[in-house]
C-alpha cells in the first residue's frame, strides 16, 4: 500500500475513534462555550510549537467567531526561532505575563492544545486561567500523556489540570507511520484531529447560543461578499482584539 494511503487510513481511524470516544466531551465543551457566548463572554485559545496552529484556527476565519481570540507569543511559536521556542515551552513563568496582555474575564472559555501535554507553559496557562475563572478545555494525546512525565513542578499533565480534557487520539509522539529506511515514524496527525475538535466545539456552541436567544457574531469570507460586514466588526473590536 502507498504510504499516503496508509496515512489517510490512519487519520480516518483516529477521526472515527474521536467520534466514538470523545464526542460527549466535545458536546460538553460546546455547551460551556455556547453559554459563554450567550452571556457576552469570549473564547480564547493557546498552544506552543505546532499546537499554536489550533489557536490561530479560531481567529479571523470565514464562518468563525469574532469573539474567538488566539493567545500568541512569538517566543513560543516557530516562525522566528524554533530551537529557542522548544526550550521556552518547557520553562515556567511566562503564562501570567501572556494572560495579562488579553482582557480575559471570569466566564470566558480557553482552549489549550498540546499534543504531549507535558510542557510547563501550557500546564501553567491552564492553572493561571482557571484561577481567574475561565473554563479550560485541553486538547492533548492521552497515549502520549501516559507514556511521558510532566515537565511542570506539579508533576501533572495538561489533561490533569484542565476542567475538561479531550483526547486528540494521536499516538505517542504524534507521527504515526513506520517506513523502512527511516529512523523514526513519520506522518503527524494532531493538527488534523485538533482542527476538527476546535471547529466542532465552535459550530455546536453557536447553535447552543442561538437556542438561548443570542446570535454570535461571525466573519464572512473577505474573498466573497464579506468586506462590508467584516469592516463593521473590525472597527467595533479593533481596540479589544490585539491581533486585528
Image (cartoon, helix red, strand yellow):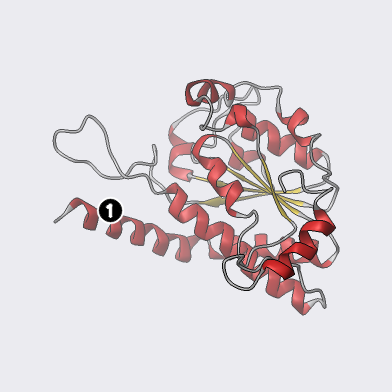
Residue 72: image x %, image y %? Answer: 65, 38
Picture quadrant where residue 97 is located = top right
Count of labels in the image: 1
Residue sitting nearer the eye, 224 or 47: 224
Residue sitting nearer the eye, 88 or 135: 88
Residue at 79 percent of width and 41 percent of height: 102
Residue at 44 percent of width and 54 percent of height: 192
**Would you place residue 73 above or below residue 10 in this image?**
above
Picture quadrant where residue 157 is located = top right
Q: Is residue 14 left or right of residue 161?
A: left
Residue at 82 percent of width and 68 percent of height: 38
> For mark 1, what is the residue?
7
Which image quarter is the N terminus in? Answer: bottom left
Residue 176: image x %, image y %? Answer: 31, 45
Q: Is residue 173 left or right of residue 204?
A: left
Residue sitting nearer the eye, 87 or 152: 87
Residue 234: image x %, image y %? Answer: 77, 58
Counting other residues with Cα less than 10 Å from the Cα at mark 1, is it few (<14), some (14-19), or many (20 or more)? some
Q: Is residue 5 left or right of residue 165?
A: left
Looking at the rendered structure, the secondary structure element under dot 1 is helix
Residue sitting nearer the eye, 62 or 166: 62
Residue 48: image x %, image y %? Answer: 57, 35
Q: Is residue 41 left or right of residue 148?
A: right
Amino acid at each position: 500500500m502507498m504510504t499516503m494511503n496508509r496515512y489517510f487510513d490512519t487519520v480516518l481511524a483516529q477521526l472515527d475513534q474521536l467520534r466514538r470516544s470523545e464526542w460527549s466531551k466535545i458536546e460538553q465543551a460546546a455547551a460551556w462555550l455556547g453559554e459563554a457566548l450567550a452571556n457576552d463572554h469570549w473564547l480564547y485559545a493557546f498552544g506552543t510549537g505546532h499546537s499554536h496552529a489550533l489557536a490561530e484556527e479560531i481567529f479571523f476565519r470565514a464562518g468563525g467567531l469574532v469573539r474567538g481570540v488566539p493567545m500568541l507569543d512569538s517566543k513560543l511559536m516557530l516562525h522566528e526561532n524554533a530551537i529557542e521556542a522548544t526550550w521556552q515551552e518547557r520553562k515556567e513563568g511566562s503564562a501570567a505575563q501572556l494572560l495579562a496582555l488579553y482582557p480575559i474575564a471570569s466566564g470566558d472559555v480557553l482552549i489549550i492544545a498540546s499534543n504531549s501535554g507535558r510542557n510547563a507553559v501550557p500546564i501553567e496557562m491552564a492553572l493561571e486561567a482557571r484561577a481567574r475563572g475561565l473554563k479550560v478545555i485541553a486538547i492533548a494525546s492521552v497515549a502520549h500523556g501516559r507514556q511521558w512525565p510532566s515537565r511542570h513542578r506539579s508533576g501533572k499533565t495538561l489533561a490533569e489540570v484542565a476542567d475538561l480534557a479531550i483526547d486528540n487520539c494521536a499516538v505517542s509522539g504524534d507521527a504515526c507511520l513506520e517506513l523502512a529506511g527511516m529512523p523514526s515514524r513519520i506522518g503527524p496527525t494532531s493538527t488534523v484531529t485538533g482542527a476538527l475538535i476546535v471547529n466542532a466545539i465552535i459550530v455546536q456552541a453557536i447553535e447552543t447560543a442561538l437556542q438561548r436567544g443570542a446570535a454570535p457574531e461571525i466573519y464572512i469570507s473577505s474573498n466573497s461578499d464579506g468586506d462590508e460586514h467584516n469592516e463593521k466588526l473590525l472597527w467595533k473590536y479593533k481596540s479589544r482584539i490585539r491581533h486585528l
